[in-house]
Image (cartoon, helix red, strand yellow):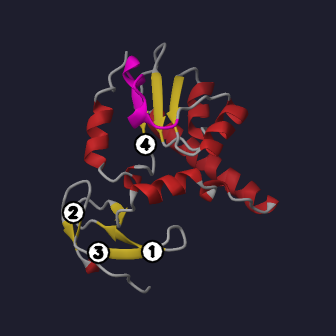
Amino acid sequence: MNRINFNKNICPLCETEVNENNIVDIVENIWKESKNVYQCPNCKLYFIDKPSREEMEFLYKSDFYIKNKSPVYKFIDDKMKYARALNRFNYIKKFIKKSNNLNVLEIGASNGLLLSLFKKENFNVFGYELNESARKNAFKKYGIEMKEDFLKDKDINKNKYDVVIMSHILEHFINPKYILNNIHNFIGGG
């Protein structure tokens, strides 16, 4: 692994300072410049050198997540994604006392697979996904209409959510503390 230039960095979650010893990998071939991947020695969060807002917008508007794949790879990938979603669903469901009209929100919902499992169990589902192709796929495949960006949605506080899911998403935010504080404001349904 060839480490790229190291700048002083701080964990975006617990604010522990990291150094070159905390670099665990490098992300290449996504943006113009490679990014170091760190693991915080304190809270164990994985995070990367901060991409610019322009770099993030480029990533979510590109087809990075939905590249064409061979039929065999796509079949195996779909089965693995379903198994992971089912595992998450069963884990989350253990902590929910089922009653009528429970609202489940997923931020970074990809193609809506996890939300579809909650929908089958008669939960009210809501989702946000930055990638337009993934949102269209969620509607086409599962009938789940998702919005683009919860931070820009002025109507998000109209509902209170009983369950908020963010799986493999926190590391995508430049300021995760701000995000978690915002999410806290709309938790607390029936």
Q: Earlier in the sequence, mark 2 or mark 1?
A: 1
Instruction: Give the residue drawn at x 52%, y 37%.
Output: 148
The secondary element bearing badge 3 is classed as: helix
Residue 22 is tagged as 3
Q: Which of marks 4 and 2 is in front?
A: 4
Q: Do the residues under discs 2 and 1 have CB atoms within 8 angstroms?
A: no
Which residue position holds label 4? 166
Q: How far apart are marks 3 and 4 (CA)?
A: 24 Å
What stretch of residues is rendered in magenta?
148-163
Q: Distance between the residues labelled 2 and 1?
A: 24 Å
Which class describes the residues within 10 Å of circle 3: few (<14), some (14-19), or many (20+)? Answer: some
Which residue position holds label 1? 34
Q: Nearer the viewer, mark 2 or mark 1?
A: 1
Q: Which of marks 4 and 2 is nearer the N terminus?
A: 2
Which residue position holds label 2? 42
Q: Earlier in the sequence, mark 3 or mark 4?
A: 3
The secondary element bearing badge 2 is classed as: loop
- Indicate the position of residue 96 as horizontal and vertical percent values: 42, 27
Q: How far apart are marks 4 and 2 (CA)?
A: 21 Å
Q: Which of marks 2 and 3 is nearer the N terminus?
A: 3
Which class describes the residues within 10 Å of circle 1: few (<14), some (14-19), or many (20+)? Answer: some
- Indicate the position of residue 37 as horizontal and vertical percent values: 38, 70
